[in-house]
Image (cartoon, rainbow, N blue to C red):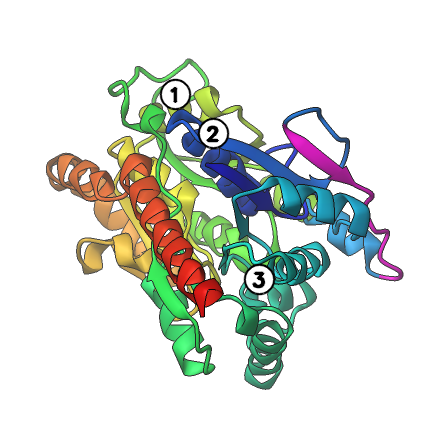
Amino acid sequence: MKILLVLDQFDGANNGNTMAGRNLAQRLKERGHEVRVLAGGESRENEKWGLAVYHVPIFNNLVTRQGFAFAKPDMDKIREAVGWADFIHVLMPFFISKKAIMVAREMGKPFTGAFHVPPECITYSINMGKWKLVNDFLYMVERDYIFRYIPHIHCPSKMIADFLVKHRFKSQLHIISNGITDEFFQGSKLEKTDEFKGRFLVVMSGRMSHEKRQDVLIKAVRLSRHSKEIQLLLAGQGPLTEKYLRMGRDLPNPIMIRFYRRDELRDMLHMADLYVHASDAEIEAISAMEAIATGLVPVISDSKSSATGQFALDDRSLFKAGSPRSLAQKIDYWIEHPQQRLEMEPRYIEKANEYRISRCIDQMLDMFSLEIEENRKRLSK
């Protein structure tokens, strides 16, 4: 089957949406499908229709600092891409996705969509994440602008599906994880490199932005009874990197912030002692799932706007959202109970197995098949 994926940004690996698209494309190809992409950036023959990128007035600096870019609709390329495809799947709720859906409807092509951009991920970037009226309004905008045209929506977590039901989305919802790639299940604990030896290595990975709340983790390490033993490592990059470096430079062991390639990240997680995910808003934290797949016990925010808490096996791995003191208490617990931490590690690997990407691709293809059959019936009427 010829499958077209539509998303604003496909090149690079600096945000979760892009990585979800790249992983999906690769796994569909491995299943024997021909996959091409409609996205911003340069065109690549037999792989990608490239579109120009918007420079957003006033907000362009904010958008680019978040590691994102909006693609400009080019109707000639959109028609060519949709005309080539047997099936279209859109991953973003913006301009090119709306145009691709409208063309697919005209051509009678089957299509589905993914809900990867909840309003909270936008509003937290402008310090309005807890403004309920604003978030509710943006859910309505997404629903009426694009999702009311999409018969089947991929929801990466039950939390997102519940939010869409609450905001009166009428499409059929499919709860399917974006999945953990096999590389994170491979290998075993590694001996710490010299820079980490003798320290309790606490890790959080993800973009440095307001909603991820790395600031809560930095403050928690400062409050910990074991702060002199802890080495805090933030894996990633983003607009708040410099701020967090300043915040963490006076810790007993100054904070480390680094960007890792996938293989480097896997190896670093295999050296770590504890994983923390402090985010206030998250549709599905693949970074946390990857850490759990390596056997790390997590400590996760219990935020109602974050789906990541679903991976905690008990309350020892949950802390009160936004509270450095609560997080410090949970970190101290796991430092002081090493045997219990060792006992939980294989249980977390077992939990992560439920989210292997191979299972998730099976579910995505089932959703595609359902839409293909329903579209065939629609056309025959």
Residue plotted at (65% across, 26% down): 46
Amino acid of disc 1: Asp
- Mark 2 or mark 3: which is in front? 2
Tell me, yes or no, whether the highlighted magenta stretch contains residue 55: yes
Pinpoint residue 39: horizontal percent, then vertical percent. 69, 42
Q: In screen coordinates, is 41 left or right of 169? A: right
What whole-number distance in Å separates the C-alpha atoms at marks 1 and 3? 29 Å
Residue receiving disc 1: 267
What whole-number distance in Å separates the C-alpha atoms at marks 2 and 3? 26 Å
Residue 26's label in the rendered image is 2
Magenta span: predominant SS is loop
Tell me, yes or no, whether the highlighted magenta stretch contains residue 317: no
Residue receiving disc 3: 121
Amino acid of disc 3: Cys
Pinpoint residue 326: horizontal percent, then vertical percent. 34, 62
Vertical order, 98 against 275 (above or below): below
Q: Describe the element under mark 2 as helix, strand or loop.
A: helix
Residue plotted at (21% across, 38% down): 353
The disc, 2 or 1, on the residue closer to the chain's N-terminal end is: 2
Give the position of the C terminus as an image quadrant.
Answer: bottom left
Q: Describe the element under mark 3 as helix, strand or loop.
A: helix
